[in-house]
Amino acid sequence: MATITIGLMFSGWLTPVPGRAQPDQPNPNSGVETTNCVTASITTNSTEATVTLSNVPPILISVGSSVNISTLALATNAVQIIDTSYTNAGNSGNDKCPDTYVTNNFAATLLTNWWTASGCGVNSNGSGLNTSSLTPTSDGQITITLNQKWEHTLDTNTDVSSIQDTIDVVCSMVTVDSLTPDLSGVYGVQGGLEDGSDPPTYWVCPCPGDVIVTASSSPSLTADQLPDCWTFTGGVEIDKLHHKVSKTDLENGPVTFTVTCGTSTETIILEADPERDAYSALIPAGTCLCDNFTDPSPFLDRCGNSLAIDCVGCDCSIIQLYIHGHFSYRYNGIWVGTCYFPAANNTFLYKTTKHNCRILRTWHLTQQPTSPTQWVVTKYDCMTGAGSLQNCRTSPTWDFNWGRPADELIDTGYPANSCENQGTPSSGNCPPYDWQ
C-alpha cells in the first residue's frame, strides 16, 4: 500500500517585543535621563494568519492495489506591530524621544478537517487529513478533496476560514506484459525454447554464469513504479523486474518463474539441457603422416570445451625410416585416448547434452587385428575429470556390433552387448596406447 505523508510546521506564540521606550515613559538614551516624552500617535500594522495544506503530487496506482493519502496543515501566525511616536517638549540631541514598537503574534487555531474521494469505483469520505485505504476497481481517476477549517483572533476580532486541496490519483490497469530469459553466451546462444511447451519451458546450457529473467509491464513501468500487487517469484531477486538463477544450479532440477499483477500472470520454466540419447562420432580421416594436423580443429560445445584429434609421433626426417604417426584425442588439451592407423580399427565417440551444450564424456576403441582379437576401450568423464580408464579385452573373434559404449541409451541391448563386456580381460598390461 502506498502512503504519502508531508511534514507539519507550526509557528508558536512570540513574546511581545518592546521598542526603546514605552508610551508616556522616559525614552532612555546613553548617559542622559529623558523626562519629557509625550505620545503623539499610535499606528497599528497587521498581517493575517494563514493555513495551507502540504503539497501531495499526482499519483499513479494499479487497479487492484491500494493507496491512502496523507497531508498536514501548515500554519503561520497573525502578526500585529504597534508603532508609537512621541512629541519632544524642548529636548534635543541625546534627549530626543524616538518611536517605540511592540510586536504581537496571534496563532491560528485548527478546527475540523475532512476528506472525500470518488472515481475508479471508489466513493468514500471521512474525518481528518488521512484517507482510509482506497482500492480502485477500474481505470480512470480518483479525485480526493482534503478540507481544513481554522480560525484566528487579531485584537478582539475572530475570523473563521477554510482551505481545501485536490489530489488526483490516476488508476491504471497494470498487467504483466512479458517474461523472458537472457540466454546469450560467449560461445553462442546457451539455451532455447522447447517447442510446444506450456508453460514455456527453456533448455539452458549448464555453463558457468547466471540466467537473468526479465519481466515487463503494460504500461511500461520501472521497478520502483510498480504497484503493490506486483509479485515475482523464482530464483534470486535482483529487483521487482529481474530475477536470476545459476545455470549450473539447474542441474538440481527445473526452476519456475512467475510474475503476477492483479488478474494477469506469466510463467516460464528453466531446466538444464538433458543428455543426448546417442553418442556422436569423431573419427580422423586418412593416414597420420608428417603434417601434424588437427582434425577437426577443434569441436567446441556451447560452454567453450573442445575436442581435438592431433596427428602426433610421426617421423619423416629420414624417408627410408619413415614411421607412421598416430592420432591423439584431447579434451581441453587433456589426453583422453590414442588411435593407430592403418593397422588398427578405431572408433572415437563422445556424449553431449541434447543441444551440444556440454561434452559429458568420451569413449574410444582401438581393436587390434591379432589372433586372438585384442581391443582396448578408453573412457574419460569430462564432468569429474576421471580417467583415462582403460579396459583391455581379448576374444577369439570380433563382432562389430560390440563397438558401442556400455551406457548407450538408444539400444536396449546395451550394456550387455558392449565390447566392454565381451571376451576376457587381458592377462597382461594394456598395450602402450597412451603415447603422447
Image: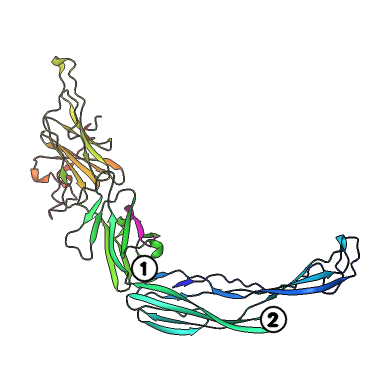
- Which residues make up the magenta segment? 239-249
Distance Cα–Cα, label 1 vs label 2: 60 Å
Q: Please, what secondary structure does the residue beneath circle 1 have?
A: strand
Tell me: 321 left or right of 388: left
Kindly identify which numbered label has been placed on residue 231: 1
Please state which of residues 1 and 155 is positioned toward the viewer in this rendering.
155
Tag nearer the camera, 1 or 2: 2
Other-residue count near label 1 (Cα within 10 Å), few / some / many at <14 / 14–19 / ≥20: some
Please state which of residues 45 and 200 is positioned toward the viewer in this rendering.
45
For the C terminus, the image quarter is top left
Q: Does residue 73 appear anywhere in the picture?
A: no
For the N terminus, the image quarter is bottom left
Which amino acid is tagged 2?
A: Asp
Residue occupied by mark 2: 155
Which amino acid is tagged 1?
A: Thr
Position in image of residue 377 (x %, y %): 19, 40
Q: Quadrant of residue 175?
A: bottom left
Position of residue 336 relative to residue 127, above or below, is above
- Residue at 25% in and 50% down: 190
Position in image of residue 241 (x %, y %): 36, 61
Tell me: 98 left or right of 281: right
Q: Is residue 242 magenta?
A: yes
Q: Quadrant of residue 43?
A: bottom right
Q: Is residue 316 magenta?
A: no
- Furthest residue to the front? 90
- Residue at 14% in and 15% down: 319
